[in-house]
Amino acid sequence: MRRPLYDRRHRGRYYDSRHSADSRKPGRPGKRWCAMRVGFVGLGVMGRPMALNLARAGTPLVVWNRTPDRCAPLRDAGAEVAAGPAEVFRQADTVLLMLADEAAVDAVLGRGTPGFAARVAERTVVHMGTTSAAYSAALERDVRAAGGAYAEAPVSGSRVPAEEGRLVAMLAGDPAVVASVRPLLAPMCRESFDCGTVPGALLMKLAVNLFLITQVTGLTEAFHFADRHGLDRARFLDVLDAGPMASSVSRMKAPKLLARDFDVQAAAADVLKNNRLIAEAARAAGVASPLLDACHALFEETVAGGHGGEDMVAVLRALEARTDGTPAPLAGPARTW
């Protein structure tokens, strides 16, 4: 039986153009292709549910993760588990990278080694993690010079939207490459937006994250203010939820604050990393970011206090420590920006 061209759960967005009579190979317009296998590397808090949604949508998938036991649910969902990154690139035409940082991306690609060109030539590399915009621009140049294609596709959302396939993707790159990558994102994302050329998508992601960081920190500070004034904390959150300030973010994070539930959706350590990337981009462009700087200090204290693996609402601990006069001491030199 012929597989439908789209998954109706995703409002008719195409998710598997292999089944279109006019489908073309990603990054190689004009060439017919079939039975494309997709690679996915990086099965962390975000990556694993994203890859699971791809596998469950019927995408032929080959995956790899540095920690092998993270791969087990993907194997159960029908994905092939590769022995290493090189095998992923040998088997897949398009490889999605959902990795923690620039060093991890370079290691998976073999960048700076003779193996780099062998991996990326005639492949499409899709960078879905959050790194500096300058890094992504340089990576695109290197991939294209080696005969590959490249697109940025960072996503906005945390673990729960990743599990539910409700992420928002930002795409940048050559228009033909972006057009070929977009259908692959539908099982993972409810919307995708074209952000122009590289590094437009990563800059957009940093702008979105700036708003997220200041929003959640503001919510947490307001909760702490209400708590220390003896207000009914649940009633405070009810009032907030009934008013115009309510949002999907506040509705996700407010119950965690009330329950002191710090189980991770977006880890404080990752938020601090993103904060640094945004601050560096702001300084490079001469853009003032005073609210971000205040958040940066609070997340530094959160991580220094041993809470980097907890959800970002654990910034509450840093606020409580400041109120109590016991902020966590920071290690390392002071920031120069």
Image (cartoon, rainbow, N blue to C red):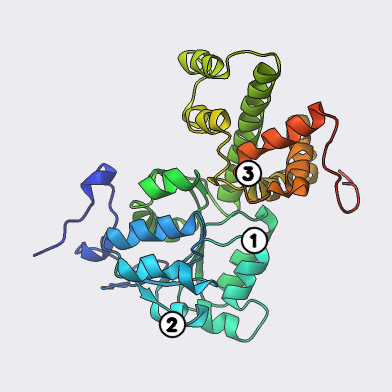
Which labelled disc corresponds to residue 101?
A: 1
Q: Nearer the viewer, residue 305 or 39?
A: 305
Q: Identify the mark nearer the N-term, 2 or 3.
A: 2
Residue drawn at (21%, 62%), measured in percent from left and top? Answer: 20
Q: Quadrant of the C terminus?
A: top right
Quadrant location of residue 9?
top left
Q: Amino acid at mark 3?
A: Leu
> Residue furthest toward the bottom?
114
| Residue 188 screen position, x and y as percent | 38, 51
Left or right: where 232 falls relative to 163: right
Which labelled disc corresponds to residue 90?
A: 2
Q: Nearer the viewer, residue 198 or 83?
A: 83
Mark in front: 1 vs 3: 1
Residue 227 lies, with reference to residue 212, above or below; the image says above
Residue drawn at (56%, 56%), measured in percent from left and top? Answer: 129
| Residue 131 screen position, x and y as percent | 64, 56
Q: CA distance from mark 2 to mark 3?
A: 32 Å
Q: Identify the mark nearer the N-term, 2 or 1.
A: 2
Left or right: where 38 falls relative to 130: left
Q: Are marks 2 and 3 in contact (CB under 8 Å)?
A: no
Q: Amino acid at mark 2?
A: Arg
Q: Amino acid at mark 1?
A: Asp
Residue drawn at (38%, 54%), measured in percent from left and top? Answer: 185
Q: Quadrant of the N terminus?
A: bottom left
Residue 108 lies, with reference to residue 299, above or below; the image says below
| Residue 183 screen position, x and y as percent | 34, 55
Mark in front: 2 vs 1: 1
Q: How many marks?
A: 3
Q: Identify the mark nearer the N-term, 1 or 3.
A: 1
